[in-house]
Image (tube, helix red, strand yellow):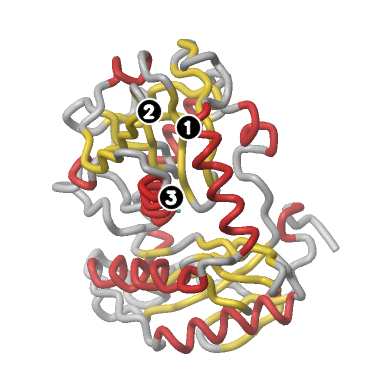
Amino acid sequence: MSDRPEMFEDVDEIWMDGEFVDFEDANVHLLTHALHYGTGVFEGVRCYETEEGPAIFRWEEHLDRFYDSAEVYDIEIPFEKQELTEATEELIRREGLQSCYIRPIAFYGYGPLGLNPGKSPVQVGLAVWPWGAYLGEEALEDGVDVAVSSWRKYASSQIPTNAKTTGTYVNSVLASLEAKENGYTEAIVLNKEGNVAEGPGENIFLVRDGEIYTTGLAESILDGITRRTAIELAEERGYTVHDDATISRGELYTADELFFTGTAAEVTPIRSVDDNEIGAGTKGPVTDEIQTAFFDLVESGEREEWFRYV
Ligand SMILES: Cc1ncc(COP(=O)(O)O)c(C=O)c1O
């Protein structure tokens, strides 16, 4: 098989525009509108292995965000939510996966080129593949070294930050490339005002004096579903969570603990920022508690309203 990237090596099929097609046939035309102008929206969802079988975590919330993102660009997804749900479940079953990452995508396809996508057809795809810890298994235990990026997060007055839009991820790509080139695992991006926004694909949490802070939705961040989960888990454990915080760069350096949340990154401790050790330079106790609660939850599938069993 193949010159395929390792992560896709065992993927047999992809769902595209209403049909299951062979992996090699899930192609688009060179003149696809989204390829030129970034006019697509997508999601990243995880399906976890539980005792009751594979369970998709917070699928409805992801699906809602997917349709909301599409609405921003007048992308009319030509499938009902129920159809995409059934197709995703069927795909996971066909691939025989116990756990996986799920990537729904909708975009303006091949039609007349020009900035107004009005006449381009909307194409929709769903792919699933096995995906372990995004920043590495070690990162979950030891934490990651991150750097504040010289690239700012675009403001929500320029491009809606609550939509998960393919084209806007060039901002994340730049931040991530810069961090890697300078020897860091991940970046933190500041917003236009110079306050902390988020990671290139993660929300950020700060712990100080036993209270938890995360940057507010008005700070040009994505309304992360793992962020919502972490807030809820923390509050249930008695923590005060400030979910509308404005955090300055300097406050990162003096935090007791910092951690990222995201579907891909799950709950990942941050052990240093710009070479400044955070706390003791290891996973802190609050981070550990939230991370443990998170993994206990997704591995048990116990809170039924948050899981869709495949
Ligand atoms: C820019 C950005 N922020 C935050 C997140 C975390 O969001 P979620 O927890 O919904 O995956 C993501 C990942 O989707 C992201 O791309």
The C terminus lies in which quarter of the figure?
bottom right
SS under mark 3? helix
- Of the pair 73 and 94, the residue shown nearer to us: 94
Q: Residues within 10 Å of mark 2 (few under 14, many from 20)?
A: many
| Marks 3 & 2, CB-CB < 8 Å contact | no
> Residue tagged by mark 3?
233
Residue 14: horizontal and vertical position, in percent?
64, 76
User: What residue is at 60 percent from the left and 81 percent from the top?
Assistant: 89
> Residue tagged by mark 2?
207
Residue 221: horizontal and vertical position, in percent?
29, 45
Left or right of 271, for residue 76? left
> Residue tagged by mark 1?
286
Q: Earlier in the sequence, mark 3 or mark 2?
A: 2
Q: Is 187 rendered above or below residue 235? A: above
Label 1 amino acid?
Val
Q: Residues within 10 Å of mark 1 (few under 14, many from 20)?
A: many
| Marks 1 & 2, CB-CB < 8 Å contact | yes
Label 2 amino acid?
Val
User: What residue is at 57 percent from the left and 66 percent from the top?
Assistant: 302
